[in-house]
Amino acid sequence: LAWRDFYKHILARNPHVCMSKPLYHKPAHSNNSNNNIRWEEETEKTTCTPPPRLFFFNLWRRGRTGFPFIDAGMRQLNATGYMHNRARMAVASFLAHDLLLDWRLGERYFMEHLIDGDFASNNGGWAFCAGSSGGGVDPPPKPYHYFRVFNPCRQGERFDAEGEYIRKWVPELAGVEGKAVHDPYERGAGREAERAGYPRACVQHKASRERALQRYKEGLLVGRDTA
């Protein structure tokens, strides 16, 4: 309740967040403008169909990323219109960092599907999880907290240690035992997962994290109007 009221005060004081602008909005091309993160669809030129943004965004929204905890959260959202706060944070970080897609795509998707959707809370939560690209209100270390990138597998291991949540919402992995349910293809359950039709990971987290950190760093230090 405190966070809900807090974000409503933020919205009342900063109505520009309703216009797809980050909280700490600065003019384009200014130093340290957090409007300048270069999202993946803006840098990858390809003739593939569908384009990269739509392809990876569709994997995310359908719960087919190959990261069980992420997929469980998105499938729960699609089926019930609800998702636990920890899962919301994990899927938001995954979209903005691992897939390097504009966080506002996820913000909009949540508002279209959440039964408890509240603009102020949703906007603030996504800004928080996206890091400096969203201009979240979380007090960051100097100069920004863009380096806070959730590990999707570790999030599952930490908050769904027995894998019950994953097995409920990702039935392809219902028969996978032990910790392999958090990363079946890397923990000896790949054949079972493949037979059940569960996809491999769509990205490598370590490489994606490094890419995101570099892109965020460039966006904060070099003024470009790409948001």
Image (spheres, rainbow, N blue to C red):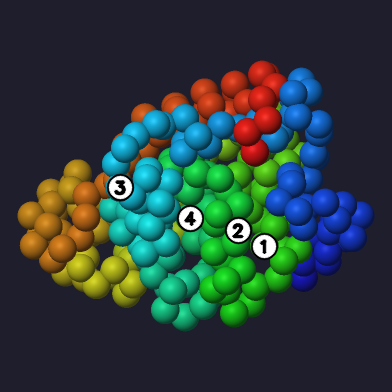
Question: How far across and how far down the image is residue 4, in percent?
Answer: 77, 66
| Residue occupied by mark 1 | 122
138 lies left or right of 50: right
Q: Nearer the viewer, residue 225 or 127?
A: 225
Figure quadrant of residue 226: top right
For the view shown, which residue lies furthest in the right direction? 13
99 lies left or right of 31: left
Looking at the image, is mark 1 or mark 2 earlier in the sequence? 2
Badges 4 and 1: C-beta atoms under 8 Å apart?
Answer: no
Q: Residue at x 67, y 19 (%)?
A: 221
Q: Which mark is residue 217?
A: none
- Which quadrant: the C terminus? top right
- CA separation, marks 1 and 2? 7 Å
Of circles 1 and 3, the one toward us is: 3
**Above-or-below relation of 46 to 122:** above
Q: Which mark is residue 91?
A: 4
Q: Residue at x 52, y 23 (%)?
A: 214
Of circles 4 and 2, the one toward us is: 2
- CA separation, marks 2 and 3? 24 Å
| Residue occupied by mark 3 | 49
Q: Which mark is residue 107?
A: 2
**Mark 2 element type:** helix
Looking at the image, is mark 4 or mark 2 earlier in the sequence? 4
Disc 3 residue crowd, few under 14, some 14–19, many 20+, Cα 10 Å = few
**Mark 1 element type:** helix
Looking at the image, is mark 2 or mark 3 earlier in the sequence? 3
Q: Residue at x 59, y 21 (%)?
A: 218
Q: Amino acid at mark 2?
A: Glu
